[in-house]
Amino acid sequence: MSVLAMKLPGLDLKNPIIPASGCFGFGREFAEYYDLSVLGSIMIKATSVEPRLGNPVPRVAETPGGMLNAIGLQNPGVEKVMATELPFLAQFDVPIMANIAGTTLEDYVAVAEKISKAPNVAALEVNISCPNVKAGGITFGTDPVVAAELTRAVKAVSDVPIYIKLSPNVTNIVEIAQAVEVAGADGITMINTLLGMRLDLKTGKPIIANGTGGLSGPAIKPVAVRMVHDVYKAVKIPIIGMGGVTCAEDVLEFLYAGASAVAIGTANFIDPYVCPDIITQLPAVLEKYGFKSAKEAVGFAHR
Amino acid sequence: MRKQEEMLIISQHEIAKGIFELVLKGDLVSTMLQAGQFVNVKTGDGGLILRRPISICNINHETSELTLIYRAEGAGTKVLSEKKAGDFVDILGPLGTGFDLDQVEVGAKVVLVGGGIGVPPMYETVQRLSKRGNKVIAVLGFASQEDVFYEEKFQEFAEVHVATMDGSHGFKGHVVQLIQEKGIDFDWVLGCGPHVMLHAIASEYGGSKKGFLSFEERMACGIGACYACICETKDGSRTRVCKEGPVYDMSEVKV
């Protein structure tokens, strides 16, 4: 077994590095930069039943150590994703995590049922935490009862294991994590963006057309590490950690906190090569801190 | 080949008020083939993480040099403007879709319209059109005399007219007024500048002339992945300014 390999429900990972949903499109743009087969997995852009045009511009604003975005889940809809995007990704030797989103429970069920049957979809990532759409998204991720209900419904129709993507915009994230575990989730991915706002000093109005946006980037890393650390203690299902990761050392910190794999988001916007670069550097960083494998570092903070 | 490189600064000068000309050298230049594309620049400010998209002003394959012209306005570009010859800058590119000059018929008369920081991409463009024998007229617009740059450089390749909003240099008014005042006749119009200028060009000539317009939009990644910089086309589809753009056919895009 290789130093970096990791086995999670539905996912036989060559390494624990996964580009995060919404930061990697459907892989096409990055395929112009490197061979996507080097990646552990790919979390594709959130897919809904119908095509979504997304929010008006401006959709992003820069902040110290990060950025706010309110793209609004722009995507071509599940039919098109299955007809063109997933077949495109099938040329690469990489299991896909299909991120699914909706405005009603029925939407999630409909997308899950269809997309989980695609041959290269190895797992679903259920997005109950998008802060940038008016209906659905985060409303499913802030109440443990509602989150559990959605988890059960998606689990019942999915042909592949399901991971629930948690929102940090809650009072007690552990409570939500436990609720989705009991409801049958195979794993957890965390965290989505933190709800934020920036104002234009001349107009006094928000810079982002949507008003609020989700904060991502290095600024949120300590919040994400703390939350993974808390949730690891409270659940038995595996966690895929994310939030502000830019280098192999950051990956190690998430493994210590309890993540079994790590997703890279905003850093892809700054350095398109960040994922393959981290995969190359990770073995040396593991060795430097005395680990024989990535697996050995998982949960080190708790030992 | 990796599309990202630490490029060496050959020179950097302030050529107009707050406007900097940056000459960089590196292998990446060999991959820059089209006028109107841009590069995404890591400005090196610790607090801000995103790159800054800056359009390509001049490509020299013989010397492997690239010229960028930008306005030092925000924190990131101010840090960039303080770098000196001998320093390195992290460049990603070339990015986006530039001017498809093959569509411009040999023998066609072309007017190039640049407004402020929209002037730089027109400099690579004017050289290419002039080399293939097109009659080119450059119409350059600035706010005031202290903002004017590259007037003489364009004169090597084209008939040049300059407009300033306050009339302190050249024609007083905006670029479309100048084109009309001088009675300039043309087959193609290529424009890059503020949205209000592109709007004026499209409303005046959108129905009668062929043209390309280069857009500016707030970007995050610059490579088509984040869907931040959306521009709506006339058929209702939403395209990415950093990928399908920044240059669009004037007949296809809503201005």
Image (tube, coloured by chain):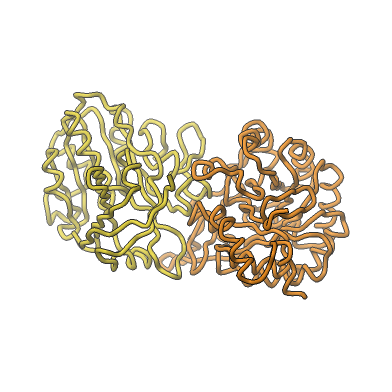
Chain colours: A orange, B yellow
Q: Quadrant of residue A245?
A: bottom right
Does A37 appear above or below B235?
A: below
Q: Nearer the viewer, residue A41 or A303?
A: A303
Q: Quadrant of the N terminus of chain B?
A: top left
Task: Tell me what residue is drawn at x 68 percent, y 34 percent.
Answer: A82
Q: Quadrant of the C terminus of chain B?
A: top left
Task: Tell me what residue is drawn at x 53 percent, y 47 percent.
Answer: B225
Task: Tell me what residue is drawn at x 53 percent, y 42 percent.
Answer: A31
Does B144 appear above or below B31?
A: below
Relative image position of residue B106 (x, y in whole percent): 22, 24
Relative image position of residue A225 (x, y in whole percent): 67, 70
Task: Tell me what residue is drawn at x 68 percent, y 67 percent.
Answer: A291
Q: Is A282 placed left or right of B125 in the picture?
A: right
**Residue B199 in sight from this viewpoint:** no
Q: Nearer the viewer, residue A266 or A75?
A: A266
Q: Nearer the viewer, residue B52 or A276?
A: A276
Q: Quadrant of residue A157?
A: top right
**Residue A21 in sight from this viewpoint:** yes
Relative image position of residue A174 (x, y in whole percent): 79, 68
Q: How many marks?
A: 0
Q: Quadrant of residue A295?
A: bottom right
